[in-house]
Amino acid sequence: MFILRISVTLFILLITISSIMAHVDLLNPNGGETYNPGQIIQIEWQEVLRHEPLNWDILFSSDGGVSWDTVKSNIPISTMNYSWELPNIVTLAGRIKIVQDNVDVDYEDISDDFVISSVTVLNQPNEVKKVKVYPNPITDFSLIEIENPGNSSHTITVYNSRGQPIRTLQDIKTNRIPLELGNLSKGIYFFQLNSNTELYMKGNFIIQ
């Protein structure tokens, strides 16, 4: 019984150590970057633990990891970077996933959210706040909650996945904005909240 307990303890310890130690580390992008559609960026990674690797795969998500598209597959195992031209889309929740294809178990690392946007503003503060949207994803109705303690006037603009403005609400002075879906189809949308010429807040929502 004593030996069995030791074996179980060692097994649990090995699983814990294995889950803590990364097998592949995505170096760039990390998340928090802002890019332009069509811009060429360098995706970089490093191998942390060697198994029986076959090759690398790179995937991209424009919706925070809900869905993934292949950027490049079967990259030689000795290669640790890839030049990628960003798609012509707008997203506040872009992510890159690097996958280490192995003979047995595959391993991966995923970046935090980065931005692809051609939307320009006259004056962008150092820190742009994110807006709460709930529920999100949306099926019929949702609320956008903003920080507006002084009841200042704001304008909110909603963009589709191609970066085209599709809806504008002006003279917003409350801190809760009902989101009317109207004729919006399923997919991911982005919005910016502007106060005068400043980008004050930004966010995204998904319609299911």
Image (spheres, rainbow, N blue to C red):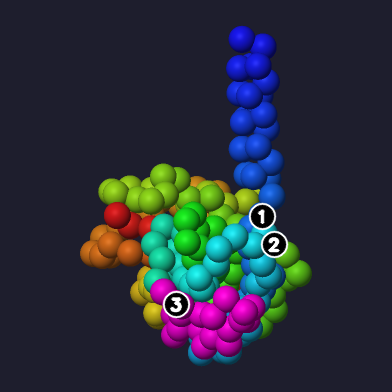
Kind of residue at disc 2: Val
Query: Which residue is drawn at the image coordinates 65% and 16% (left, top)?
Result: 3
State which quadrant residue 187 falls in.
bottom left
Kind of residue at disc 3: Ser
User: Would you name the residue on which mark 2 appears?
Assistant: 48
Query: Which residue is drawn at the image coordinates 73% and 70% (left, top)?
Result: 125
Quadrant, the N terminus = top right
Query: Which residue is drawn at the image coordinates 57% and 76% (left, top)?
Result: 77
Q: Where does the image place residue 76, in percent across and percent down from the top left?
A: 54, 80
Alpha carbon separation for disc pair 1 and 2:
6 Å
Rendered position, 162 above or below 191:
below
User: Would you name the residue on which mark 1 appears?
Assistant: 22
Question: Given contact means CB atoms under 8 Å apart, are the residues at marks 1 and 2 in contact?
Answer: yes
Alpha carbon separation for disc pair 1 and 3:
21 Å
Q: Where does the image place residue 95, in percent across and percent down from the top left?
A: 53, 67
Instruction: Using a 10 Å C-alpha cutoff, classify the residue at mark 3 as few (fewer than 14 neighbours), some (14 to 19) or many (20 or more).
Output: some
Q: Which mark is residue 73?
A: 3
Quadrant, the C terminus = bottom left
Q: Magenta segment, which residues?
A: 70-89
Instruction: Using a 10 Å C-alpha cutoff, classify the residue at mark 2 as few (fewer than 14 neighbours), some (14 to 19) or many (20 or more).
Output: few
Query: Which residue is drawn at the image coordinates 65% and 37% (left, top)?
Result: 14
Q: Main secondary structure of the magenta part?
A: strand
| Residue 22 shows in the view | yes
Kind of residue at disc 1: Ala
Relative horizontal placement of residue 186, taking residue 153 as reference (left or right): left
Which element type, helix, strand or loop, lies under badge 1?
A: loop
Rendered position, 18 above or below 205:
above
In the rendered image, the residue lying farthest to the left is 183
In the rendered image, the residue lying farthest to the top is 1
